[in-house]
Amino acid sequence: MALMRNQVVVITGAAGGIGRSCAYAMRDYKLVVTDYSQDIVDKLVIELRSEGIDALGYAADITDREAVEGLKNLALRQGNFKAVIHTAGVSGATKNIEQIFNINLRATDIVIDTFHDISRKDSVIVLIASMMGHAIPPNPVYDEALRKPNKKNAFSVVEPFVKNNSDTMYNFTKRGVLLLCEDNVMRFGYMGARIVTISPGVVFSPMVKQAWHDHPETMEIQRRMTPAGRYGVPEDIAELAKFLISDAAEFITGTDVMVDGGLFSQIMKANDEKDKSTNKDAKATKEDTKETKPK
Ligand SMILES: NC(=O)c1ccc[n+]([C@@H]2O[C@H](COP(=O)([O-])OP(=O)(O)OC[C@H]3O[C@@H](n4cnc5c(N)ncnc54)[C@H](O)[C@@H]3O)[C@@H](O)[C@H]2O)c1
């Protein structure tokens, strides 16, 4: 534990449901916690310190490259850089699709690049993606833009595929996070460092409480479809993140771990069945039309 006290773990989105839970799970490390608002970060640091956790706060908009640079420099001054747990993000409830692209994807790319600079042997980057990132199929056109989200035209390449639907943009950005992990793995591997993603299912955090409020029926259907029989809780994600940054996970890199209680497989199965029955109906209608055609 004395060793861990000298290792610095940075948590973005630390005031959110998953971020805060990660801060508690990583309590044996030296923490640098960051979120959007100074006031919220200050309160969080007071709370964590009152629990005996060694935490320092830094307020930053994660989409601002200079601010992320400042975060890196602060982390560097605290000791040996161990990990970033990057949880900052917004859901489809944010109706501005460009803002979703910037926060969920462009900022993730900035975080990877910036913390690559101070990574060393055994450092780990943990990115929070989503099971919904897996629902977007591969495509050479938008994948190229998702892989390089800070290129000037990246947003305008992805935009037409999203059809102004903020939930769809959310799913695209999370596919992008999965691709960034794949693309960066060798870059970290050269120095003995790792990069991984976690894809949560439905985790009961403030983000999901809002969705629950907006679409209670959909949320209840999802809960009933979940083989584990419950929603996720932030601790499900935080405990995995803690394992992933530990030496016990030293052979895990460049990959995604889904933590969804089994829900994603059931969504895919239901979609397949829906497609099959739509195809069957379409075939039956075609046959009927053939039969009623005058000979
Ligand atoms: N909760 C879920 O069911 C779920 C499912 C799949 C994926 N995720 C992902 O997990 C991550 C954490 O989600 P959560 O449920 O804890 O959400 P949350 O809303 O509770 O926390 C997100 C945090 O990110 C911060 N943030 C947003 N924009 C920021 C910005 N520009 N700069 C700095 N901080 C910013 C917010 O202030 C907030 O504290 C997100 O990336 C989310 O997409 C969540």
Image: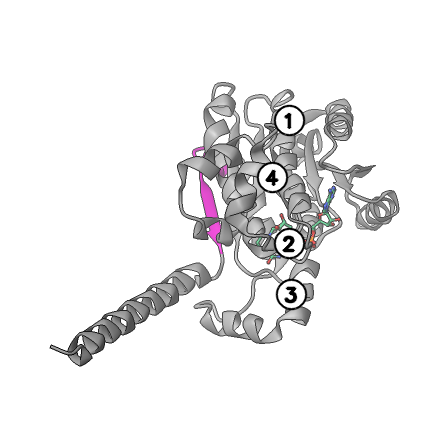
Q: Which residues are magenta?
A: 248-259
Relative to 4, residue 291 above or below? below
- Residue picked out by circle 4: 105
Question: CB of mark 3 within 8 Å of CB of mark 2?
Answer: yes
User: Element type at marker 1?
Assistant: helix
| Residue type indicated by callout 4 | Leu
| Residue type indicated by callout 3 | Ala
Circle number at residue 211: 3
- Residue picked out by circle 1: 115
Relative to 130, residue 270 above or below? below
Circle number at residue 91: 2
Question: Magenta includes 254?
Answer: yes
Number of other residues with Cα within 10 Å of mark 1, as a class: few under 14, some 14 to 19, many 20 or more? many
Which residue is pictured at 47% across the width and 29% down the height? Answer: 183
| Residue type indicated by callout 2 | Ser
Q: Is residue 274 visible?
A: yes
Whether residue 77 sits left or right of residue 122 in the image: it is right
The quarter of the picture where the N terminus appears is top right
Q: CA distance from mark 4 to mark 2?
A: 12 Å
Q: Is residue 26 visible?
A: no
Is disc 3's CB within 8 Å of ligand 1?
yes
Task: State how the image is colored.
Answer: one colour
Nearer the observer: mark 1 or 2; the answer is: 2
